[in-house]
Image (cartoon, rainbow, N blue to C red):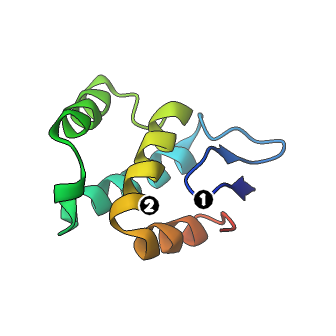
Amino acid sequence: MLVGSVGKVEEPGRGLGAGGASRELAEDLLDVLLTTYNSASIHPEIGVEVARIYMSGSIASPESIELLLKLCAKVEPEKTSAILRKHGIDV
C-alpha cells in the first residue's frame, strides 16, 4: 500500500472504500482528531464538514479517509503514522 505524505491512500488490488478495515481506520483517525490538543489548526468549517460526513454514514469512503488523513497528519503526524502502521499501511 502506498501513502503520500498526506495524499491518497492506494493499495494494489484492494480498495479502501469498502469493508470493516476502512471503517476501523476512519474511526481511529477520527479519534485522533477528537482528542488532539492541536485542534486550533483545524478551521471550524472543516470540523463541521467532518461532523456532516460522520452523521451521513460516509466516514469510511475513500474521500472521507483522505480528508481525515490530511487533517490528522497536520495536527498529530506521529499518531497518524502509528495508526497507519497499525492498519498495515507503510508510511
Residue at image position (44%, 69%) is 77
Residue at image position (58%, 64%) is 87
Quarter of the figure with the N terminus: bottom right
Q: Earlier in the sequence, mark 2 or mark 1?
A: 1
- Badge 1 element: loop
Q: Of residues 5 and 35, which is closer to you in this image?
A: 5
Q: Of residues 67 and 17, which is closer to you in this image?
A: 67
- Badge 2 element: helix
46 relative to 6 in the view: left or right: left
Counting from the top left corner in percent of width and height, residue 24 is at: 46, 53
Contact (CB < 8 A) between labels 2 and 1?
yes
CA separation in Å, label 2 and label 1: 8 Å
Q: Quadrant of residue 54?
A: top left
Badge 2 amino acid = Ala
Residue ID for mark 2: 73
Residue ID for mark 1: 5
Task: Inspect this view and state whether residue 61 appears.
Answer: no
Badge 1 amino acid = Ser
Q: Of residues 31 and 69, which is closer to you in this image?
A: 69
Residue at image position (55%, 71%) is 86
